[in-house]
Image: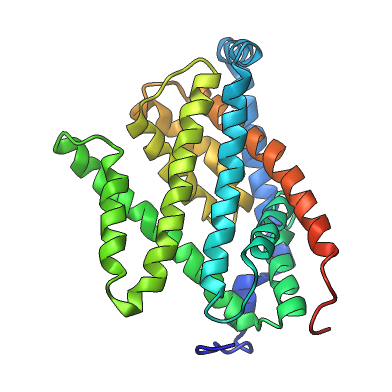
């Protein structure tokens, strides 16, 4: 292992990574209540609810498959980002890290978000990764996601005023990341940020499909905006996987961004959330089973 090792005794690090049981219970309860409220808001408008169900009933199976593939693609990219960030300190095979991230993501749908703790515990047991290293990598991963979202939030209005298409934001970010690789101190993070930008692109693609599946079309600019909103909501620490927050954020901003109603925005987000559950949970379960059959850990 090389590179500076953060202190593992700092209680702030332990609080960030593990948190108190009471706080995690409150966060889970908040997410569940917000999610149920979003579903009730959709059910309250029966016309939108029945129209969405009808659109889903005759939707093209290939579009559904694309939505699931986009979810799995995001998982894979996330695993590669974590592998890249950890590789300065420990040599974890990329396949193993991808499986670990998939298993942790699936576990985070459970109460109290055990996925983060499970990932840290696994790396500690199998690869002797100190808590401080996991804290550092986790913070770096969150910071990179925030930086990517902020770039797009700033770039998209400028592109709109200049008459540029929304997808030009990805070209702008890619060029910025390539330039950043020229600085040795920024190279590692610049490469990782490209993976985060790839995740955002797949999420935007998923929103294009999700709205189409409920019979509502949006353009690419709106899809990218929704992807930024969803990414920001998922980073909120008190809501597991952005549960409830994402649904309300997309619903409330759908009229301004895409000209659709609150209920239609919630319906599209629930389709997106359903795809995550259908794709991520089985993938995470298979990944966890594979990891359990790996050789014995290097430390107790």
Task: Tally the numbered discs.
Answer: 0
Q: Residue furthest left?
A: 162
Residue under the image location 48 percent in, 49 percent down? 199
Residue under the image location 57 percent in, 9 percent down? 47
Q: Position of residue 37 (x, y in %)?
A: 63, 33
Above/below status of 300 relative to 263: below
Q: Could one spot residue 160 in this view of the protein? A: yes
129 or 52, nearer to the observer? 129
Residue under the image location 76 percent in, 77 percent down? 126
Q: Position of residue 295 (x, y in %)?
A: 83, 72
On screen, residue 113 versus residue 160, left or right, reads: right
Q: Quadrant of the C terminus?
A: bottom right
Above/below status of 52 relative to 70: above
Q: Could one spot residue 251 in this view of the protein? A: no
Q: Quadrant of the N terminus?
A: bottom right
Q: How is the image coloured?
A: rainbow
Location of residue 124 by image quarter? bottom right
Residue under the image location 60 percent in, 22 percent down? 62
Above/below status of 202 relative to 215: below
Q: Position of residue 118 (x, y in %)?
A: 74, 66
Q: Position of residue 272 (x, y in %)?
A: 58, 33
Location of residue 96 by image quarter? bottom right
């Amino acid at each position: 292992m090389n590179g500076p090792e953060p202190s593992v005794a700092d209680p702030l690090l332990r609080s960030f990574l593990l948190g108190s049981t009471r706080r995690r219970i409150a966060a889970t309860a908040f997410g569940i209540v917000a999610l149920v409220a979003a579903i009730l808001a959709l059910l309250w408008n029966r016309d939108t609810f029945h129209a969405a169900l009808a659109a889903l009933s005759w939707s093209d199976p290939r579009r559904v498959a694309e939505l699931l593939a986009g979810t799995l693609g995001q998982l894979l990219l996330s695993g590669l980002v974590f592998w890249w960030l950890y590789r300065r300190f420990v040599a974890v095979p990329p396949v193993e890290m991808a499986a670990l991230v998939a298993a942790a993501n699936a576990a985070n749908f459970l109460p109290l978000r055990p996925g983060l703790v499970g990932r840290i515990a696994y790396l500690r047991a199998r690869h002797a990764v100190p808590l401080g290293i996991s804290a550092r990598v986790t913070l770096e991963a969150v910071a990179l996601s925030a930086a990517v979202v902020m770039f797009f939030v700033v770039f998209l209005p400028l592109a709109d005023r200049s008459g540029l298409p929304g997808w030009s934001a990805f070209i702008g970010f890619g060029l910025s990341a390539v330039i950043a690789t020229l600085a040795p101190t920024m190279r590692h993070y610049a490469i990782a940020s490209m993976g985060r930008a790839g995740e955002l692109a797949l999420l935007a693609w998923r929103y294009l499909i999700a709205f189409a599946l409920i019979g509502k079309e949006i353009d690419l600019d709106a899809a990218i905006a929704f992807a930024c909103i969803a990414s920001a909501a998922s980073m909120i620490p008190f809501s597991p996987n952005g549960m409830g927050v994402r649904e309300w954020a997309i619903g409330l901003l759908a009229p301004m961004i895409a000209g659709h109603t609150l209920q239609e925005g919630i319906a599209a987000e629930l389709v997106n959330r359903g795809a995550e559950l259908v794709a991520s949970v089985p993938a995470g379960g298979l990944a966890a089973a594979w990891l359990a059959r790996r050789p014995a850990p290097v430390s107790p």
